[in-house]
Image (cartoon, grey):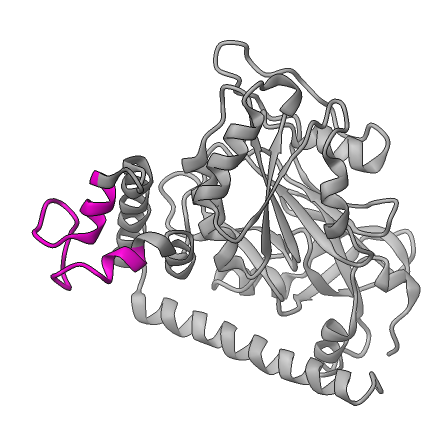
Amino acid sequence: MSITGALTGWGWNSYFEAFWQCGGWKTAVPARVIAQQRKFWCVAGEFGERSAEASGKLRLAADEGADWPAVGDWVAAELHDPSTTAVIQEVLARRSKFVRKSPGKRIEEQVIAANVDTALLVSALDDDFNPRRVERYLAQCWESGAKPVIVLNKADTCEEACARAAEMERVTVGTAVCVVSAKTGDGFGELEEFLRPGQTLVLLGSSGVGKSTIVNRLLGQTVQEVHPVRESDSRGRHTTTSRELFILPAGALLMDTPGLREMQLWDAEDGVAQVFADINALAGKCRFGDCRHEGEPGCAVQAALDAGTLDPARLENRRKLMREQEFLRRKVDPEARHEQKEQWKQMHRAQRQKYQQRQKDGGKQ
């Protein structure tokens, strides 16, 4: 099949087409999941938009740990009568995925967004400003394969916006930090470079940070309901109840998600290491290789704390996230998890090679 305008409008490109041609689907067509509510979805493709449900085969496979469709996924969908619901047969291999541990006591992965190019990690500049929470989101984002961008919203309510932005830049070295006001529109020009046609972005953050207002501002119309936050602590409540993918006027795709009240990391050891690369570099200079940075002689981390160049809260957050990863490692079969992760990497490495070869060949089919 060839790439059509209808598909490219939803983010289809040579990367996904190369994978599709290897799938051998005869009667199914490619479609993108653009909305999800419980076990029902809305998919879009050359046929327009249609509600969808999972096939019996996919439901059985999901019970055994196979991928369950998430917003942003490309899927193989069977279309029958135009008035009937589409049937999702299989989820195509993801180029990236933002996940978390399922809320509550269940020890399993929950996919929040799939095939995302850029993750806009939204934090408010009001009384709910929290660099430690951003570090948590950032760790999972680096693990996902998407590029993170920090969006500090509600600049119109904060007289210390510049100082707080500088504080955030110190803990997110190498990550773009944009200061905006979704209410007034100030600062939105900084986001334009990430809003390229065909690129998929996701808004992530806790309740009350202003994600719905940002969606409405970028779309130029009100599509998401907005409620004020509590005055006592600047915390919000869910105004977005489902995940949905929107096409912005300039052609980029924006995914909105409900506010996350619980964001426990899932298999994010590499992401944690990247977020705290500065502390890891210091740890490499400690006198003892097994230094716990708790007062041992020759501890470079402790020296940085004493000198005031390392925030104690940042070090404690690193310890907390590492404890979470250790707990997860004990609860989940480490060999099986490692094998699954390696298979995912190998599959995507092979896909990248196919895509790069196709680009060298001039995009020929």
Q: Where is residue 361 in the image (x, y as percent from the top left)?
A: 79, 90
Q: Where is residue 144 in the image (x, y as percent from the top left)?
A: 53, 58
Locate residue 215 relative to residue 61 in the image: left or right.
right
Q: Name the image quarter holding residue 78.
A: bottom right
For the C terminus, which image quadrant?
A: bottom right
Q: Which residue lies furthest to the front in this view?
A: 307
Q: What stretch is highlighted in magenta?
A: 280-306
Q: Where is residue 246 in the image (x, y as percent from the top left)?
A: 79, 44
Residue shown at the point (87%, 48%) measured from the top left: 250
Residue shown at the point (45%, 42%) measured from the top left: 170
Q: Nearer the viewer, residue 193 or 203?
A: 193
Q: Where is residue 71 in the image (x, y as percent from the top left)?
A: 67, 51
Q: Which of 234 and 264 is in front in this view?
A: 234
Q: Residue furthest left?
A: 297
| In this view, 276 is above or below 226 | below
Locate residue 304 relative to residue 37 in the image: left or right.
left
Q: Name the image quarter holding residue 25.
A: bottom right
